[in-house]
Image: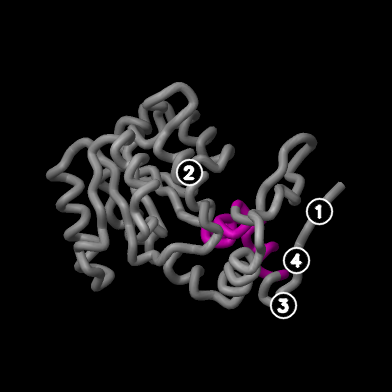
Amino acid sequence: MTMSAPSLDHLWILDRRKELAAGLRENIAHRYAMDAGSIILHQEAVDASEALGKNVDLPGMALTDQVGLLDFRPGVSFANVLRDACPLSVIVLYSEGAYGDPSRIDSWLEERKIDFAVRKGDIEKLHGVLDQVRRISESVAARNLRDYISSQPDPPAPFYRVKKGSYLTIADLYREILRNTPLGQQTAKAWDQQELVAQNH
């Protein structure tokens, strides 16, 4: 596990449709003046998951079809392998099929298995998500929180209570800042002054 935030210029795309993924890589590389070689394509969740253990350049963001949220072994999916390997990485569901069951997408968001959901083909919304994450990641609050997290000798334990029996880690709060949720805005306001927001009730 690494608690350092990988560069957003390292992006992975997990999609079984190779041609679509290649076109998406070209689009993103052109829009953000990225080296296309830093956008890694995978077609199988198990291969992408195994690569996480070998690749020194972990993705700062992963775009995945629903295949990345489905278990390829009992209790093991690409999304949870990435969360374990690098909790600060952002996961974007980019899928058409998943929208057949919107309640499942809501559950994935609530459980923080994913950070954003975009229907496949809505490239304008996808650009909006990428723009937001890149912009907010350069904010004072995001930088302060990243610096704090990376300075810790061990991954900080869950400390922020959402509701009884449900806690968030500080990495979750970092991604909430990038999502610009009400909780993320509250956290960002505190970290603008480098103040730790904690609710250990």
Residue highlighted by disc 3: 193
Q: Amino acid at mark 4?
A: Leu
Residue 201 as seen in the image, left or right of residue 77: right
Residue 119, placed above or below residue 154: above
Residue highlighted by disc 2: 114
Is 35 magenta? The answer is no
Residue sitting at the far top: 74
Q: Which residues are magenta?
A: 172-190
Residue highlighted by disc 4: 196
Chain-order first, disc 3 or disc 2:
2
Q: Foreground residue, 46 or 95?
A: 46
Q: Quadrant location of residue 164?
A: top right
The local secondary structure at tag 4 comes to: loop
Report the Cα–Cα distance between label 3 and label 2: 28 Å
Residue 91, placed above or below residue 70: below
Callout 1 crowding tier (Cα within 10 Å): few <14, some 14–19, many ≥20: few
The local secondary structure at tag 3 comes to: loop
Is 182 magenta? The answer is yes
Callout 3 crowding tier (Cα within 10 Å): few <14, some 14–19, many ≥20: few
Q: Is residue 182 visible?
A: no
Q: Residue at x 69, y 63 (%)?
A: 186
Residue 87, percent across and down? Answer: 53, 51
Q: Foreground residue, 182 or 196?
A: 196
Q: Amino acid at mark 1?
A: Gln
Q: Residue at x 60, y 55 (%)?
A: 171
